[in-house]
Image: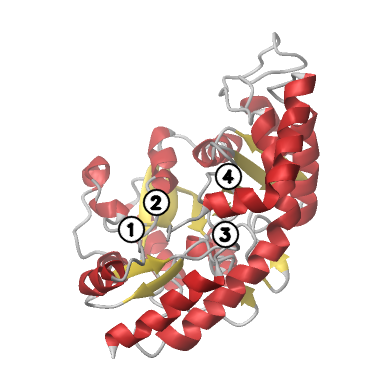
Amino acid sequence: MQFIDLEAQYKHLKQRIDKRIFNVLTHGKYIMGPEVKELEERLADYVGVKHAITCANGTDALTLSLMALEVKEGDAIFCPTFTFFATAEVVAFAGATPVFVDSDVSTFNMCPVSLEKQIKRTIDEGKVKLKAIIAVDLFGLPANYPEITKVAKKYGLKIIEDAAQGFGGEIKNQRAGSFGDIATTSFFPAKPLGCYGDGGAVFTNNDDYAELIKSYRIHGKGLDKYDNVRIGLNSRLDTIQAAVLLEKLVDFPNELIARNDIAKKYEEVFSCYFNTPAVPFLFKSSWAQYTLYDSDSDSIRAVFHSNSIPTMKYYPTCLHEQTAFKYLNYAENDFPTAKLLSNQVFSLPISGYMSNENIEKILSSCILFD
């Protein structure tokens, strides 16, 4: 059993994906070919926004968003400490200051109460200027945007939605990628919608941001590629990856149904043994990972592994503890909930193409914990 079975997905879509790739090889427009434009139109339609701008990867998508918002040295960007490194990495790379925020213990996402606390602390210290919030849709569940938006409006902050794991999630029938001023996602193969390499996208309803991001992703170009009007990046999605994503996007709604069916079965069985992930009322998760937590997680993972069931641990070191962010002078226990989660969480296999045999094997493993 594999933790993420990309092979099973490819077998299901093989003929369609192969045909799409062959078409690209035939027309030979490998960079920014017609499939890229087609994908951007379909992504915008799926998410429900005016603009979807593809790029080379999810990290670049965040960088492009910060560039569009003119984030610079002296700006404070609030982001969770319990997440992948890239979320705060791009802030520091822009010369701004990441200000970390604790997590909600039931959803694993940014805690709005901790967010406001960190905003007030930053104001009192007076060292950096309030600029934006990067909220992460961790493990497939959109962050608490109704509450985060209230806080953002109160203090005049922009919101960037990091939907690298959240693509396909919803709040009140509004899809991930449409929250905040700008949203980003990643098409890394392990993400809910993944390609066969690196890829990313930025989503927005703001025409000005969209035009800036389109320019920034191609060396800051103006009317043509030899008319560079600003300093940008080289961050284009290649056409073969767009071709793969076009076919995977067609089947994506069915994958989400299958993921949610598996998550429901996991909840019914494992909630008797472990802390299971909460999905608030009117929220939907895309279940990038199905994540449990328990004070004895290492021993529990060992039991699963002894039964040939793979697990993964996301994320064992919070961002405020990372060596790269030691200069911010956070104490280890400044974010107690995030610290607890980093010590106790572990994820089980989940995908839209898991065999019934593997699902049943995971479910029946509960007897190992009686």
Q: Residue at left 32%, top 61%?
A: 313
Give percent across and percent down for residue 217. 62, 27
Query: Of callouts 1 and 3, which one flags the residue occurring earlier in the amino acid sequence?
Result: 3
* Label 4: which secondary element: loop
Does the CB distance between marks 3 and 2 fall below 8 Å? no
> Where does label 2 land, which residue?
84
Q: Is residue 150 above or below residue 87?
A: below
* Label 3: which secondary element: loop
Does the CB distance between marks 1 and 2 fall below 8 Å? yes
Q: Quadrant of residue 35?
A: top right
Q: Nearer the viewer, residue 95 or 288?
A: 288
- Whether residue 21 sits left or right of residue 268 in the image: it is right
Residue 350, numbered circle: none
Give percent across and percent down for residue 63. 52, 36
Near mark 2 (Cα within 10 A), the count class, few <14, some 14-19 or many ≥20, is some
Near mark 1 (Cα within 10 A), the count class, few <14, some 14-19 or many ≥20, is many
| Residue type at numbered disc 4 | Phe
Query: Of callouts 1 and 2, which one flags the residue occurring earlier in the amino acid sequence?
Result: 2
Of the 4 image quadrants, the one containing the N terminus is bottom left
Query: Of callouts 4 and 1, which one flags the residue occurring earlier in the amino acid sequence?
Result: 4
Q: Nearer the viewer, residue 165 or 161?
A: 165
- Whether residue 225 sits left or right of residue 9 in the image: it is right
- Whether residue 352 sits left or right of residue 45 in the image: it is left
Of the 4 image quadrants, the one containing the C terminus is bottom left
Q: What is the distance, in whole Å, between disc 1 and disc 3 at their CAs?
A: 16 Å
| Residue type at numbered disc 3 | Gly
> Where does label 1 land, which residue?
315
Q: Residue at left 23%, top 69%?
A: 302
Count of residue discs: 4
Residue 166, numbered circle: 3
Q: Quadrant of residue 223?
A: top right
